Amino acid sequence: MNEATQRLPGVCANASERLTDLRRKSQAMAQLSWDRTRNTARAADDYVHDSPWRLIGAAALVAAEVGYVLGRR
């Protein structure tokens, strides 16, 4: 029991360091994900503004296909 009591502070310090490192990495990954999402949304917005009729046509085609499939059942 004495040996375990002596090792406990080192184990706690090691766990605390790992938790801090994990928290830092998690925050960095969340920021990277947010940045990528924001860039993708901007690119999609730019594409829609540049050629809206392509998107409208594609949406109409998908809607017609879904209607056809659901109408057959």
Image (cartoon, rainbow, N blue to C red):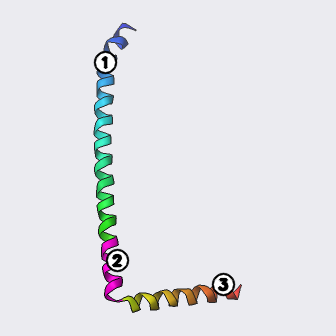
The quarter of the picture where residue 56 lies is: bottom left
Quadrant for the N terminus, please: top left
Residue at the (57%, 90%) spot, across then down: 64
Residue lying farthest to the right in this orientation: 73
Residue at the (29%, 25%) spot, across then down: 13
Residue at the (32%, 41%) spot, across then down: 23
Question: Judging from the image, what secondary structure is the residue with disc 3 in?
Answer: helix
Residue lying farthest to the top in this orientation: 2
Cβ–Cβ below 8 Å for labels 1 and 3?
no
- Which label is found at residue 44? 2
> Residue 5 placed where, x, y %?
36, 12
Q: Amino acid at mark 3?
A: Leu
- Which label is found at residue 42? none
The segment highlighted magenta reads: 41-51
- Which label is found at residue 70? 3
Q: Amino acid at mark 1?
A: Pro
Q: Earlier in the sequence, mark 3 or mark 2?
A: 2
Q: Which residue is mark 1?
A: 9
Label 1 – label 3 distance at C-alpha = 65 Å
> Residue 47 placed where, x, y %?
32, 82
Cβ–Cβ below 8 Å for labels 3 and 2?
no
**Can you say whether 55 is above or below 16 in the image?**
below
Question: Judging from the image, what secondary structure is the residue with disc 1 in?
Answer: helix
| Residue nearest the observer in this picture, 58 or 13 | 58
Q: Earlier in the sequence, mark 1 or mark 3?
A: 1
Residue at the (28%, 43%) spot, across then down: 24
The quarter of the picture where residue 72 lies is: bottom right
Q: Main secondary structure of the magenta part?
A: helix
Question: Judging from the image, what secondary structure is the residue with disc 2 in?
Answer: helix
Quadrant for the C terminus, please: bottom right
10 Å neighbourhood of mark 2: few (<14), some, or many (≥20)? few
